[in-house]
Image (cartoon, rainbow, N blue to C red):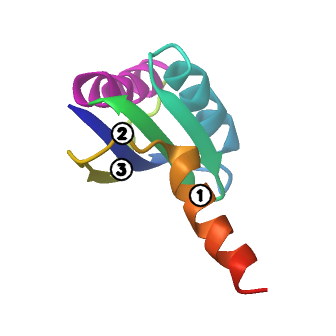
Amino acid sequence: MKCMADLCVIPFNGKISVADEIAKCHTILKQFDIEIALHGYGTNLYGEWDEVFAAIKACHVQLHEHGIVRISSTIKVGTRTDKDQRIDDKIQAVETRLNQST
């Protein structure tokens, strides 16, 4: 089953910035057979359910292995059975409507 997830990883690193850890997470996510789209407060993931959640787990595991003791992640996930709708499809649907209203 395909799913789309919105992942926000919050590593507790003792610093204000978490950009280094998010960059590491992004590198980890790219190793999986999923679509990823970084945005201002997280990352959209699209692919097979097991692959998406394996990628999320890998982020946690590898950040822990790099010394991050505590990680909190929020995950929103959706599935649909009527069509295969990817990240760009959802964005395009909204942009189309925005262009129609101008």
Image x and y of residue 88, in percent: 58, 46
Q: Quadrant of residue 51?
A: top left
- Asked if 55 appears above or below 14 in the picture, the reply is above
SS assignment at label 1? helix
Label 3 sits on residue: 72
Above/below status of 102 relative to 19: below
In this view, 87 is above or below 25: below
Residue at position x 37%, y 29% in the image:
47
Mark 1 highlights which residue? 91
Say which label, 1 or 2, has the lower sequence index: 2
Residue 58 is inside the magenta segment: yes
Q: Quadrant of residue 4?
A: top left
Residue in the picture at 71% in, 86% down: 101
Q: What residue range appears in magenta?
A: 49-66
* Secondary structure mostly taken by the magenta-highlighted segment of the chain: helix
**95 to the left or right of 5:** right
Does the rendering let one see residue 42? yes
Q: Amino acid at mark 1?
A: Ile
> In front: mark 1 or mark 2?
2
Q: Is residue 64 magenta?
A: yes
Q: CA distance from mark 2 to mark 3?
A: 30 Å
- Residue lying at the far bottom of the rendered structure: 101
